[in-house]
Amino acid sequence: MADTVDIKSTRSVKRFLAEQMRNIAPVFTLIVLILFFSLQSPVFFTLDNALNILANSSITGIIAVGLTFVILTAEIDLSVAAIANAIGITVAFFTMQPEYVNINTWPMYGGLAIILTLLAAFGLGSVTAFGVTVIGIPSFIMTLAMMQIADGLSAVLVRGQIAYNFPDFIVMLGSGKVFGLRWSIIVCLIFLLVAHLVLKYTRFGRYVYMVGGNREAAEYSGVNVKLIIASVMIISAMCSGIAGMIGVAYFGSAQQNGFNDFLLTAIAAVVLGGTSLFGGRGGIGNTIVGLLVLGVLNNGLDLIQIDSFLKILIRGLILLAALVINVYAQKLKESSG
Amino acid sequence: MDSLENNDGGTLVPPLQDGSPLLEMRAVTKRFGGIAALNSVDFSILEGEIHGLVGENGAGKSTMMKIIAGVHADFEGEMFVAGQPAQFHSARDALKAGIGMVHQELSIVPDLSVAENVFLGHQPVRAGGIIDWGYMNRTAREQIASLGLEIDPTKRMGSLPVGLQQLVELSRVLFSGARIIILDEPTSALSPPEVARLFDALRQLRAQGRSIIFISHFLDDVLEISDRVTVFRNGHKVATTPAAELTKDEVIAQMIGRGSAEMTMGEETELCGDDSHPVVVEVRGIGDGMALKDVSLSLRRGEITGVYGFMGCGQIELSRALFGKGNLRSGQVFLEGSPVRFRTTATARRAGIAYVPENRRMMLFRTEPVFKNVSIAILDRIARLVLRPKEEQRITGNHIEDLQIRPPRTDIALGNLSGGNQQKVALAKWLTHLPKALILVEPTRGMDVGAKEDVIRIVKSLRDKGVAILVLSTEPETILTLADRVTVMKKGLVAREFTTGHLEKADLLAAA
C-alpha cells in the first residue's frame, strides 16, 4: 500500500518536473549566470549595470513580444529585424534630415509621420499574413521573402546614407529618461505587460494557445484559425515596427543593416525562455526570462573581458543548449501524457 | 502451363502439377492483447485462382492478409507456400517468396515517371551507378502491356487517373516477382469502366498462372471476378465456396450470420423518417470533383439521418463540406431554406452547425484542462474580450454532471480521461447552446459498451430536443442503432435511401 502511494507520488513529481522543465531550466540558467558574473566582476551586481542590461534588452524585448505570439501558434517570423530596420528608416524618411544627408525625404508633422509609419508596418504585416493564410505559403518561407522585401525597402530609402533626425516623440522614447529610467525600458515593460494580459486573459489569447496546441482541433471546434494566424503575423510586424522606430532613436541613426543582430537575438530570447517551438506552450513570462538570460550573458561577457570572438561562440552554444532543452521538454511532456 | 518469369532474378518454386494449394494457412490464430483477431483459421489459395475474401470490418481479413504478406510475423499456426513450410519476418521475406500486396492507399510517388514507379527502390543501373533509362522505360512498357494496357512509361505518375495508377502499382508488384497478389479494396475508387479494365488485367494474370486474393466490400465485384469466395466473420472462417454457386444474399448471410444467436443491438431497426418534420439542412447535388460526386439529402428537425457507406465512399468529404472544411465544386447547401456557403469552420459554427470528427484527437486538446476543451467552441458567447474562467468551469461542470463524465473534474488535463469520456467531452463542446444541426462521424467507433450506450443516449436526447442530426459511419451497427432514416452512399453518389419500415444489416450491405 505504502509502495503504491510512493510510486504514484514520484510519478506525479516526475510529471510535474516534465511539465515545468521548460520553465525551470531557463530560470535556473539565469540564476547561475547572475551568480557567476557577480563573483567574476565587481561591477556586475549594481543598480547601474542592471539598468544598463535592461536598456540594452529593451529593443529586442519589444520585437520578442510579437515573436512570442507567432511562435505560440507554431509559426515563425524571420522578417522581424528587417521590418524593424525598414520602419525605423521610414520614420526618418518622413522627417526633415540635416542638409549633409543626401537622401530624398518627405518631411511632415511628427505625429502624422508616426501614424503613417505605423500604417507601413501594418501593411508589411498584412502582406505576410495574406501570404501565409490566404495563399498558404509556409511562414518560414513567406517571412524569408518579407525579410528580403523589407531589406530592399531600407536600401531604396537610404541609398547608403545615414539618417539622423526623427520625430521628437520618437527621440524621447528612444533616448529620453523619466525619473532616471529610460523610456525605452518603460515602453518595453508596457509591451510585455499588455501582451501578457492579452495572452492570459483574453479570448484572443486563448485562441492563440489553442491554435498552437492543436491546430486541427481548433479548426474543428469552429475557431477561425487563419484569422488568428494572420493576426499574430500582423502583431509581430507592428511590434517590430515600433521597436524599429524606437531603436533608430536609441542608436541615434537609421541606416541599412542597422538591426542585423536582432533577428537571432529576438528568436533566441523567446526560445531560451522556454516557449515551445511546436506551439501552445510558454508565454511572456518565458520571454522575459529569455531576454534577461541573453542580456545578462552579453553584458557579463563584456565585463569579464573575454575574447570577443569567443563571445559569439559561447552565445551559440548556450542557444544550442536551450534548443535541446526545448525539444527534450516537449518529448518529456508527450511521454508523460 | 508456362513457367513464371521472375524479373528480379530470384528463384521461384516450380509450378505445381497436382492442383495442391499454392498457399496454405493452417489453424492460424492471432491475438492482440488477449483478444483473438483470428481464431484457428484455415485458408488456402490455388495456383491460377482469383480468390475473393469478404467479411465485415473486424472480421479478420486484414489480419490474415498481414500475416500472409509478412507484416505480422508472430502468430500461431502454420503456413505453406507451394507445399513448403514458410516463415516470414518482414514484407520483404514475403515478396521474396512471391507474395505481394497492393494496398487500398496506393504507395506511389506521383511526381516520378510511370517507369520510375514500376522500378521504385531497384532502378536498373549501368556501370558507375548511372540509371539505365532505356532499359527501364522499355521494360516498364512491356510489363504494363502484359496487363493489356498501353501507357507511356515516361509520363508523370500523378497525371494518370487513379484506375491506371493502381494498375501501374499492380505491375510493380508483379515486376518484383509476385505470383500471389493481394488486392485490398481495389475497386473502391474506380468507375465502372475502370473496374472492367482492372478485371481484364486480373483475368490475364490468372491465365499466366498467378493467384490473386481479392478483398472487397463490393460483393457484386467479388462475385463477378472470383473463382472461389471465402467469408470471414468474427475471426473465424465461415466458408469457402465456388463463386458460381453463390448469390449476393447468400454471401451477406454468411457475413452477418443471420439467424444465429449472435443477433445483438444494431442488427436491425424500424425506421421512422417523417417527411412532415421541417428540413434544417438541405444538401442539393454537392460534389468536390474528387471522392464526393453528387449527393443530395435533407436533415430534418428532431431526426437522426444516418449515412452508411464503405471507406472511401465520400461520406467524410460530405461531412467536412457541411462544416465549412472542404472544397465544394458543385451543388448547393441550404440552412433553414436559405443558401449558405461556409468558407471556414468558424462561419459554420456561428450558423449553428456542430461537428464531431471521426477521430477524437482531431478536436480535443490532450494537454489542456477539460474546461478549456469544452469552452473553446462557445468562448465568443461567454466572453467578448476578457475571459471568464469561472463561467467556463461552471458550464463545464454542468456538462460533466449531465453526461456523467469521469473523473468529474474540470481542471485536469484531458489526456487523463478514458476514450469514452473524451468522446463525451467532444460532444459536450456543442451542448451549451443547442446547435441547429449536429454532424457526427463514427460517433461510437472504438468505444467500450458502456461508453457507447452513453453516447447513444446523449445523441438521442439531443434529437428529442429538436436538433437535426447527421450520423456518418462505415459500421452498419452504428447506423442501425441511431438512425431514423438512412442514406446509403457508394463511390461519391447516393445509392439508396430508406425512410420508413424495417431495415437490417443485410439491406445496408446489399445497397452499398
Image (spheres, coloured by chain):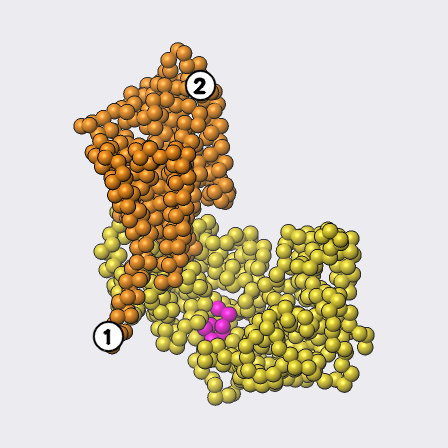
Chain colours: A orange, B yellow
The residue that disc 1 covers is: A2
Secondary structure mostly seen in the magenta stretch: helix
**Residue A158 visible to the viewer:** yes
Dot 1: chain letter: A
Q: Nearest the camera: A250 or B431?
A: A250
Percent position of residue B489, x then y? 55, 66
Percent position of residue B185, x then y? 61, 69
From this view, report whether residue B326 is shown above or below residue A105: below
| x 66%, y 52%: residue | B112
What segment is highlighted magenta in the picture?
B473-480
Q: Nearer the viewer, mark 1 or mark 2?
A: 1
Amino acid type indicated by mark 2: Gln
Percent position of residue B218, x then y? 61, 72
Q: Label 1: few (<14), some or many (≥20) within 10 Å?
A: few
**In the image, is residue B47 part of the stretch drawn in magenta?**
no
| x 47%, y 29%: residue | A151
Q: Nearest the camera: B41 or A185?
A: A185
Between disc 1 and disc 2, whose residue precedes? 1
Label of residue A161 in the image: 2
Left or right side of A235 for A202: left
From this view, report whether residue A44 is shown above or below residue B450: above
Percent position of residue A235, x then y? 36, 38
- Residue A52, quarter of picture: top left
- How far apart are the alpha carbons under marks 1 and 2? 75 Å
